Amino acid sequence: MISINRNLVSSRTDSPVSKSGDSAAARPDAPGHVRYPYLSSTNNWELSFISVSPGFNRNELKSRYDVAAFDEDDWHAYSGQQTFAYVTRYLSNPSLSSSWLLNAGAGVYELRFMQWKEVSLDLFIAPVRFRQYPICASVERLPFRSNTFGAVACVGEVLGYCDPAAAIAEFGRVIVSSGVLICDFGSSRSIRNWFDKSYGRAADLITAEYNRTPEKTWVYDPSYVDSLLAASGFKIRDRLGTHTWSALAKRLGLSSSAALSLQRHLEWLRLPSAWAEVTTIVASKT
């Protein structure tokens, strides 16, 4: 699913950075200026000034995510496969008003839809350094002009590492009318959280397992995220719940591998999506 494009973007004239954009931020090794006509000129491009959200240590995140590649554990690989299938279903055709796609919080994953021009944005530069249109910035303060993108995909539970209110408001600003937003997040109403203090909270910082090590992440009540989307001018079109049987199995004390095996064997018997560990939402800008 990942493809590294090593062509320098400085030679392109159709990309979303005017001469106001500093190539050191978009691609540190590119000569001269990268041309992205939709970039705002009001943003600070000094990488060291990009902050992280409360509850996280920048150095800890950097050690995990400022990398060009890494091996995903089976649990999150399954989540990614389910979400990518969902993204593919809804991004099969570009918007008539804009063919620019923002991969927000791209990390090491590139969506690679041929009909879209994909901008890969990440908090760290290593994952996106050699992409066709790389940008290093925070989803909470996007360096793009308003009404730029036909679609934004913010998946891989990126919202669990940022302020969702700020990020969703920014998505609402940069997406064109009738454009599509696909985002996912950990749900505080997952069956796995039943009888825990975090269950049903609008937002809660929890410690989960990622690549066999503990990692902090925010989980949200889906109704809270729904309200943020509505406030930013989005209408929800569809939603997907990932990890239902597996979340129940984890609640009952099974290992991650056993829980995932159960999930795969019982895919045919759907549990309510409201019980899912990960919620994916498709919304349109009104």
Image (spheres, grey):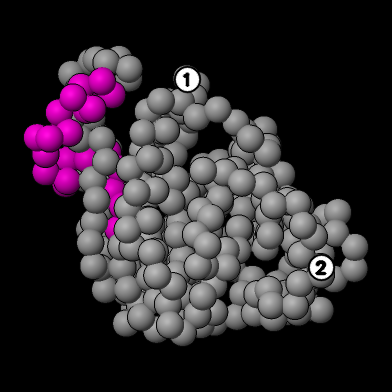
226 drawn magenta:
no
* Mark 1: secondary structure: loop
> Which one is earlier in the sequence, the residue at label 1 or at label 2?
2
* Residue 164 showing in the rendered view: yes
Residue shown at 11% from the left, 39% from the top: 270
Q: Are marks 1 and 2 in contact (CB under 8 Å)?
A: no
Nearest to the observer: residue 64 or residue 117: 117
Residue 38: x percent and y percent?
A: 64, 79
| 159 relative to 193 in the view: left or right | right
Q: Badge 1 is on which residue?
A: 212
Residue shown at 26% from the left, 63% from the top: 226
In the rendered structure, find residue 10 and report the number of the disc placed on it.
2
Residue shown at 28% from the left, 24% from the top: 260
| 43 relative to 94 in the view: left or right | right
| 263 relative to 233 in the view: left or right | left
Q: Disc 2 marks which amino acid?
A: Ser
Q: Is residue 249 above or below residue 145?
A: above
Nearest to the observer: residue 105 or residue 192: 105
Residue shown at 74% from the left, 68% from the top: 44
Residue 1: x percent and y percent?
A: 51, 43
* Region of the chain picked out in magenta, as a range: 259-281
280 drawn magenta:
yes
Residue 96: x percent and y percent?
A: 43, 82
Q: Crowdedness of circle 2 by 10 Å Cα count: few (<14), some, many (20+)?
A: some
* Mark 2: secondary structure: helix
Q: Is residue 148 above or below residue 93?
A: below
* Residue 160 showing in the rendered view: no
Q: Quadrant of residue 269?
A: top left
Q: Quadrant of residue 264?
A: top left
Nearest to the observer: residue 79 or residue 137: 79
Q: Disc 1 marks which amino acid?
A: Arg
